[in-house]
Image (cartoon, rainbow, N blue to C red):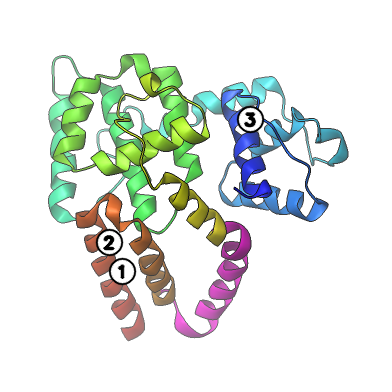
Amino acid sequence: MQIDQHNFLSLLSTGVFDTPLDVQPMSKFKWQRLRRYGEKENVRKYLDYGIQRSIYSENLSLDERRSDREIYDLRSLQYRHYLNRQKPLSRFHNSYLRLKMSQIFTKEIHEIDTSIESLALLDIITHFLNRLTEGILSFEIVIEAGLFLQQKGDKVNFVRLEEHISKLYLWKTANLLGTLLVKLFHFSPEEVPFFKKEDSRWRQVVDHYFQLSFEDLITRHHKERAYQQLYLGKHDHSRISAQRGRYYARYHHVEALSSYMANIVNSITQIEE
C-alpha cells in the first residue's frame, strides 16, 4: 500500500471513527494531493479532522480547524437522507430489480413491525452498488454505512435485511462493503452482520481505485470535461463510466450489464443530438 493511500485511510479512520492509526511523513505535494482527493470524495472535513489529531498537523496550514462538536454533528447527519423514505434513494438500472426494490419498500412500510432502519441500510448497500456500476468505489458511502451501523445498528432487523439482500442478489456487494469496513476501518465482524467472509479481492479493488484516483482520475476528469464540452458532449462521460464500471461487474452481473446497456443507449442518444 502506497504511503499516501495508507495515510488517507488512516486519517479518515481517525476523523470518522476515532480510530488512531499510524501516519507516515510525506512531501508537501502529497499532502496537498491527499486533501484534494478528500474534497473530491466529499470527506474533506473528516480528513482535516484526522489531520488535526495527527502529529503532522503543526506542519500543515489547514484552512480552518474542525471542532469536536462540528464533527459529532456531521457524523449524526451523514446518513440522514436515507431515513424515513417512502421510496429508495438508490435506483437499479435493471427494471426487474427496480420493481423488486419498490415492492420491498412498500411491503416493509406497511408491516406492523416496520423496520425503517432496515430499509435505510438496504438503500445504503444499493447506493454503494450504484456507484460501483459507475466505476467508483465510494468511500463516502462506506463511511455512511459504518456510521449508520454504529448509531442505528441496534434498530435494524437483520433477519429481514438478509431476506431483502437475497431478493436483490446483493450479497457480493454487501460482503465487499462489509469487508472494507472490517479491513480498512477496523470494525469487528460482529459489528457488520452482512459481512459473511473476507472478499479475497478487496485489496486489488482498493488499489485499482486508488491508482485511478490519486495518479490519474483528477487530471483525466479535467481533460475529459474540457474535451466533452468542446467536442463530444455527454455521451463521452457515459462511455468512460461504462468502461470503468466493468471492473466491478463481478459484484452484481445483472445490474452491471443493465448499467452498461443503459450507458450505450445514452451515448447513442447524445451523439444523435
Asked if the stretch drawn in magenta spans residue 58, the answer is no
Q: Assess disc 1: are there few (<14), some (14-19) or many (≥20) residues with their C-alpha within 10 Å of its C-alpha.
A: many
Q: What residue type is labelled 3?
A: Gly
Q: Position of residue 52 (x, y in %)?
A: 76, 31
- Residue depicted at x 74% and y 39%: 24
Residue at mark 1: 263
Which is nearer the eye, 73 or 255?
A: 255
- Residue depicted at x 16% and y 48%: 97
Which part of the image, by quadrant, shows the C terminus? bottom left
Which image quadrant is residue 102 in? top left
Which is nearer the eye, 255 or 202?
A: 202
Asked if the stretch drawn in magenta spans residue 226, the answer is yes
Disc nearer the start of the sequence (3/2): 3
Which image quadrant is residue 57 in? top right
| Camera-nearest label, 3 or 1 | 3
Asked if the residue at tag 2 contacts the one at tag 1, i.e. Cβ–Cβ closer than 8 Å, the answer is: yes
Q: Main secondary structure of the magenta part?
A: helix
Apparent side of residue 95 relative to residue 230 in the rendered image (left or right)? left
Q: How far apart are marks 3 and 1 (CA)?
A: 36 Å
Residues rendered magenta in the picture: 213-234
- Residue depicted at x 15% and y 55%: 95
Q: Position of residue 127 (x, y in %)?
A: 35, 44
Disc nearer the start of the sequence (3/1): 3
